[in-house]
Amino acid sequence: MSQIVKCRDLHFAIGDLLIIMDKFIWTNEYSVGIKEIDEQHQHFFEIANRIIDLTMKTDLAQEDVAKSLEELGNYAFYHLGTEEGYFDKFNYPDAPLHIAAHNDYRKMVNDYFVQLRAAGSDFKKIAEEMASYSINWLSGHILLVDKKYTQFFNEHGLS
């Protein structure tokens, strides 16, 4: 499954290696037609974009990375819980598959935290990977999975 993400590229060099990091840019294409969830999606992307900005610093501290990744993980889990609460409230028929996708993301975030805590870990690389993974996962998830609940949620009074 290929994912199309509207991003702006950030270029920076490490020695002779050119690194390109993508930052997410919100467009109406990503709206699910539910204000609360759209705002949460936007905030989720803002946190990931801030992590990408953080990784551009030359004096990056592991503690700063850990705090930022914790903020991203906590907010992501909060957001996923919001959606799942509506699944339960309205008895959303596609909830099991949707929750399975959420659980895949949760597992990946937990895996990044295990890597971050490992002795000698490259915390900058982990931060870059987690931010990039989160942006790509969420953008694809919105377009391919979340958009499926828009009409159902609207019919139950969410807009």
Image (tube, grey):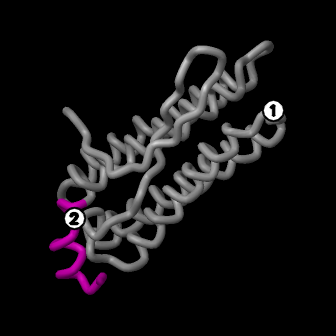
Residue 62: mark: 1
For residue 55, above or below residue 89: above
Q: Which residues are magenta?
A: 147-159
Quadrant for the N terminus in the image: top left
Q: Nearer the viewer, residue 59 or 68?
A: 59
Q: Residue at x 50, y 37 (%)?
A: 21
* Residue 50 in the image, given as x and y percentages of width and height: 62, 52
Marks 2 and 1, the one that precedes in the sequence: 1
Q: Residue at x 61, y 26 (%)?
A: 13
Q: Nearer the viewer, residue 101 or 91?
A: 101
**Label 2 sits on residue:** 149
Quadrant for the C terminus in the image: bottom left
Q: CA distance from mark 2 to mark 1?
A: 39 Å
* Residue 83 in the image, given as x and y percentages of width and height: 39, 63
Instruction: Residue type at mark 2: give it.
Output: Tyr
Instruction: Determine crowd level at label 2: few under 14, some 14-19, many 20+ residues with C-alpha closer than 10 A.
Output: many
